[in-house]
Every structure is written in C-alpha cells, then in structure tokens.
Image (cartoon, rainbow, N blue to C red):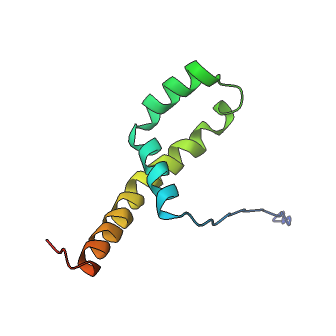
Amino acid sequence: MAKIEGRAKLHVEMPFTLSEDEAAALDALAGYGTDAFLKVFYKEMGEAYLRPHEAGLRSLFASVRSHVPTVLERARTARKAFAGKEG
C-alpha cells in the first residue's frame, strides 16, 4: 500500500523597488563580477556573514547583470528622446 504524507513547503519572495540611482549602484557592484567582488569582500570584511548566502549573492548578481543594464539603457534613451537629443 502507498504511504501518503502531507508536507508543507514555504516559499518566500520579497519584491522590492529601486530608484534609478539605486539600480545603477547595484549594477556597478554586480559589474565587478561575483568572484572578484567576493574575493575583495571576504578579504576586507570577512566571511562569517556572507559565506552562508554566497549562492544567493551569485544568483542576485547574475539577475542584476542580466536585466538591470537594459533597463538603465532604456531609461537613458528615453530621457534623450524626451529632451530632443535622439541618436
């Protein structure tokens, strides 16, 4: 006979909003590359707090590098177009 158990699974998501300046700052941090960032961070700040979350940081930086530059460029292009400085 099959054994059936009920198990709960909790999945947490935390959407947040960044200003353009904040997004640019995060893009700059991620732009160093995760390995280079971690090397300096661990050397200067230690590993105790960030090491357990390294996979999350890698995922975050990959997402930032994948999406944020495009959004920032679209904002710059739109600003230029609005100001009549297209091209």
Quarter occupied by residue 47: top right
- Most distant residue in the left direction: 87
Query: What residue is drawn where x is 43% and y is 29%?
Result: 36
- Most distant residue in the front direction: 83
Q: Is residue 87 above or below residue 21?
A: below
Depth order, front residue of 35/11: 35
- If the image is split into quadrants, where does the N terminus sit? bottom right
- Left or right of residue 7, residue 70 in this image: left
In x, y percent, where is residue 24?
Answer: 44, 54
In x, y percent, where is residue 69?
Answer: 36, 58
In x, y percent, where is residue 53?
Answer: 65, 39
Query: What residue is drawn where x is 48% and y is 58%?
Result: 21
Query: What residue is drawn where x is 17% and y is 75%?
Result: 86
In x, y percent, where is residue 55?
Answer: 58, 41
- Left or right of residue 44, residue 73 in this image: left
- Left or right of residue 52, residue 38 in this image: left
Depth order, front residue of 14/45: 45
Tell how many labels: 0
- Left or right of residue 42, residue 36 in this image: left
Q: Is residue 86 above or below residue 68?
A: below
Depth order, front residue of 73/80: 80
Query: What residue is drawn where x is 48% and y is 47%?
Result: 61
- If the image is split into quadrants, where does the C terminus sit? bottom left
